[in-house]
Image (spheres, rainbow, N blue to C red):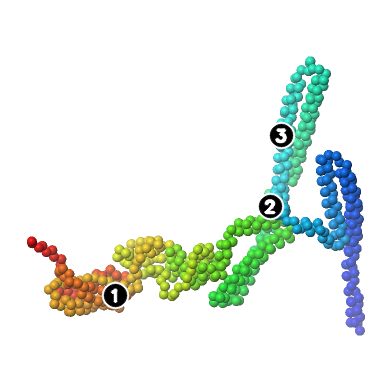
Amino acid sequence: MLRPLLLLCWLLLLPLPCLAQDAPVTTLAQDSLLKLNEIHQDLMQRQQMLAALEEALKQAKTDKRKELLKAQLDESQKQLVEQERAFEMIMTGGETLIRPEDEAEKKKFDWQNELLEIVQPIMSELRKLTEQQRKRDNLNKRIEFHESRLATINGALEHLQKASTQGLSEGALARFKEIQRGWQNQRATHQHLLGVNRLQLVNLEQDAAKKEKSVREKLHEFLFGRGLTLILALGAALAVYLIMGLMRATLQRALGGRNAQRRKIQRVMALSYQSIAALFALIALFYVFNMRGDRALQAVAILIVAAMVWLLRTSVPGYVREVRLLLNLGEVREGERIHYKNLPWAVVSLNLHTTLRNPCVQGELLHVPLSVLLELRSRPFTADEAWFPCAMQEYILLPDGQPAQVMQITDEQVRIRLEGGAIKTYDVPSFLATQPVNLSHGFAVETHFGVDYHHLNHALTQIPQQLEQGIKAGLLQRYGEGLLALTVQFERAADSSLDYRILAQFTGSVAARYTETSRDLQGLAVECAITHGWQIPYRQLVIHQL
């Protein structure tokens, strides 16, 4: 029984706080009524003033007087309209009717006025900064002007005082005195204005001294005023951008996927998301400026954004091409091959800094700006395509027949070690121009050997076989599996010898002994000739007697 009674009492007492909150509304309404009465009284007075101005305008005789009255009449009419709208807004709680003249005013768009309205807060701040100095300069100019005029007037009055008035007629004397009084009046006027301006300058200096703030006070005012606003605005913009970036990274990890189609969709989403994040960061910046009521910083930010848009307008086509590249829809695509800086590269990933790869170059990877790829074109490639004539630590044969070992390959230069240990450096184009032969993937050595004509009967049978067997045995002993093949063929019957062509093929494992292989072929051929008793001819000079 007690619980229902308590519940009933609580329900009855519940509306009382709501009723108690209505008391301030009556006070507000009374204030509004008083304000409405004041506005009505002001409207009546302005209407009377307008009537008086209209009557005076009708009776005005000169054009100058008419223009003055017309300007006053227009200003009074504007103030009357503003008061009428204020009366209406108080009555309707802030709303007002849309009038035809308001619609016409909205339809008119003057970009100069709009720009001036944006710049006005900045100009106001600049005006405040230079106001004291401008007033001081203006007063100094006035003082200089009055002093110069007084000097001229005093000179003229001295000349008038020295002038003799004897012999002047009564009319001429009266005119003389009238001119003198005029100059004296001018002197009195300029003396008065000079004194006023000097007093104004003194008062201005005293007022400036009173208002002068210390560096600490100015710093405190900036830090807790405009400086704080700027920090809050930049912090809000940065926070919004970073939070949205973190959300994007989380979303990307959640989606995953490494296939090309999904990467393309993710790239489109990432680019769109990044643009939206930048827009939201900009909105946060302006929101803080607006909430802090700093129109000057807001105007500066608007002008900076407008200037950036204006400067970037000519770059839009280039940005469109870069966006197409980022979306993997341009002339260069991921997983294809391009030619950049005289070298072939595989496009690993397209981004603001694109990653390129060449397996033969030291470090393999190269990061280049996306703009570099705008003038390039990629193509698909196969797994067996070469990326460079050689790789590091491989052996090459230069055009002059000298072997060398490749020590370093970068995207700019190639360093090789010649026989004897000397280091030689080429830039990449010069090295490629030499067209070096790669010995590390296998090579062949050719030499020629001749025997005397005394062995003509065995020149095509026993000698080639015995020569091949002897040389091959020696090469196998020296190079083992490094020897791939050996052939000995009769080449020609020369003037004083029967010549044979000896060709030995080696694997790349013996490339470091390239010069040694050539010497070994000749040495083993001579050793075979000694073993079998072959005579080695020498060049003979035959003189025929006629």
Q: Residue at x 70, y 43 (%)?
A: 133
Query: Residue 44, position in %: x, y?
Result: 91, 51
The answer to which of marks 3 and 2 sits earlier in the sequence is 3
Residue type, label 1: Gln
Is the Cβ of the residue at disc 1 closer than 8 Å to that at disc 3? Answer: no
- Pick whichever, 394 or 383, lies toward us: 383
Query: Residue 510, position in %: x, y?
Result: 31, 73
Residue type, label 3: Glu
Residue type, label 2: Leu
Q: Nearer the viewer, mark 2 or mark 1?
A: 1
Q: What is the distance, in whole Å, between disc 2 and disc 1 at their CAs?
A: 85 Å
Q: Which residue is mark 2?
A: 219
Q: Which residue is mark 1?
A: 505
- Pick whichever, 110 or 439, lies toward us: 110
Furthest toward the bottom, the residue is 1
Of the 4 image quadrants, the one containing the C terminus is bottom left
Crowdedness near tag 2: few (<14), some (14–19) or many (≥20) residues, C-alpha within 10 Å: few
Residue 346 in view in this figure: no
Would you say 464 lies left or right of 256 here?
Answer: left
